[in-house]
Image (tube, helix red, strand yellow):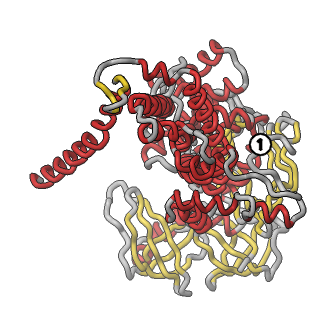
Amino acid sequence: MRRDGLFRRLVIAATVVWMAVFGVVPNLLVLGASVSHPSPTTFLSPGFTLGNYALLLDGIHAQILFSSLKLSAAVTAICFGLAYPFAALLARAGRRTRHVLLVLVVIPFWTNSLVRTYAMTVLLNTSGLVNRVLFALGLIDAPLTLLYTTGAVVAGLVYTLLPFMILPLYAALDRFDPRLEEAARDLGAGRFQVLWYIKLPLVLPGIITGCMLVFLPGLGMFYVADVLGGAKTMLVGNFIRDQFLVTRQWPLGAAASTLLTMIMIVLLLIYWWSQRRIHEGKLDV
Amino acid sequence: MAEPVLELRGVSKRYGEAVAVDEVSLTVERGEFLTILGPSGCGKTTVLRLIAGFEQPSAGEIVLEGRSMAGVPPERRAVNTVFQSYALFPHMNVFDNVAFGLRMRGFAPTEVRRRVLDALRLVHLEDLATRMVDRLSGGQQQRVAIARAVVNEPAVLLLDEPLSALDYRLRKRMQIELKHLQRSLGITFVLVTHDQEEAFSMSDRVAVMNQGRIAQLDTPTAIYETPANLFVARFVGEINVLPGVVVGCVEHMTHVEVEGRVIPLSTPPGCWQVGNKVHVLLRPEDLRVETLRDLDEDPELRASFGRVPALLGVVEETVYKGATYDVILRLDSGTMLTATEFFNEDDETVYFRPGDRVAVTWVQGWETVLAYAP
């Protein structure tokens, strides 16, 4: 028993140290950098200013931020639209079908996502597979410009992030007891009311998890925008990368990075709220 | 007689080739407690799901309060269900679970509150209104499920094996409570169960189902005492089945040759003709067993033993049951019989010993005679 306790404490301690060194400390450094003054020679000079955040919400930067949020929201919406029917099918399928489908969802992870993104250029360029098929079918006379468009970036992000939406949705729908739908209808609820009062609240944590896992990378996966979107700065991720590696404005990059963290915290709060609603319920007496 | 609250007219349900429910017709009177009793897979739950509207019949018609339910979805039927698994909403507390049906029907909040609290009082859960349902015991969840259904004052309350998840003692108590609840509310109950004791102790009438059909629909007493066929006879309690042949019919008296003896049985006139093959059915507790030794030694006992010529056999073993014990005996023909004996007030030991030569008889009229079926 004694050794067992020691082992457990060691494991916990190791995890805590790991999280502190590689999680908390870097985040604090980024937070610190985001309120430092920019410096052309030393990357940043210590101090306290909210100027970086003000700069972030100003003019061209705000535009990048806003269009990236919009793009990622669109990616999240498309992923949800594609993933929900598939996850519902998965949750209802027999054991064997379910295993096969789940393996199909996981297979793309066997290849590095950067490689898969490059593979998409082969499909999308002017002499690529998509154009050749459309041409052969007589649907187009001249090749379409597919690569280096916003559409290509959206397609690439959806392709890369779809499994992250499918898996939590599947987990939530699989846990959902379909007999509750019958019970609700038995008590007089129509199809819409069943969805709104019974199914949605119980599946909501899965939906939020999926959206979180898609929306945040959708802001940050700069290499997808680089490979499929050309030289345009489309995502907050590209912007941050550029601040650190190209224009060397570390404080501004750190501020953008902190902003992403804050968006994540907000999403986590929403998730926590939806969970709490399930487990504590609302008192309506 | 008043209009029946619920009527099934030749209702069938087929899934491809398989027939789950086969031309079931039954009528449920207002305020009645009807139980559908049958082994698993007999189609009893499907009947309930057809009434609730979760399934549509392949043929036939369901009429609720004079209205055909064809094409009417579950949410617009005046029936509510207590599910076997309870199916309580896990993200709501007790109050919200019970209030759900009323809210769906648009009752004002004050009215919802009044009715829900009334319903909770009815099932003794008024103190747990704000408790989440996953923090309730099985028995309490059961009560929530009942309150959630009865609060809507349905024309018919459907109960799908509602007590099967409870332990024996709690199940006994809930049987009595359910019966009281049904009487005091005056709501029509249709209950599905595979437990004959449960069916008998609560119901006004019992429909015994087998392979999608109703094998017999009658009062518990009639079903137990005069089963309509061998399936019902064997399904509700233990029974001894003796093959026989009718050898004589005179008015109310039929002489049947059973186990090599001709025994007079009282049956309705015109039922049987000489030569008919029959089954004579006897409940173990209706059999009277005495040892030949006692009968020889005691003329008084012999005199009281009855007019029916006794069947002779030997005791194989006795099985202690607590308040009673079963005597398993082998007749001289080789047929096995089970007789249930009560302990005497002055003698609490098992009287019969394996190897005892015994005579078996019964009170004439307590037997049931059915046409022979292989």
Given residues A184 and B262, the one toward you in this image is A184
Quadrant for residue A116, please give it: bottom right
Quick check: can you spot residue B1? no
Q: Is residue B74 left or right of residue A235?
A: right
Q: Residue furthest front?
A: A41
Q: Is residue A17 left or right of residue A196?
A: left
Q: Is residue A37 left or right of residue A153?
A: left
Residue A39 placement (x, y as % from top left):
35, 27
| Residue drawn at x 11%, y 55% as measured from the top left | A3
Q: Is residue B2 above or below residue B172?
A: above
Given residues B366 and A76, the one toward you in this image is A76
Q: Residue furthest left?
A: A2
| Residue drawn at x 12%, y 50% as measured from the top left | A6
| Residue drawn at x 44%, y 78% as measured from the top left | B292
Residue A165 placement (x, y as % from top left):
57, 48
Given residues A234 and A195, the one toward you in this image is A234
Q: Which residue matches tag 1?
A: B28
Quadrant for residue B353, please give it: bottom left
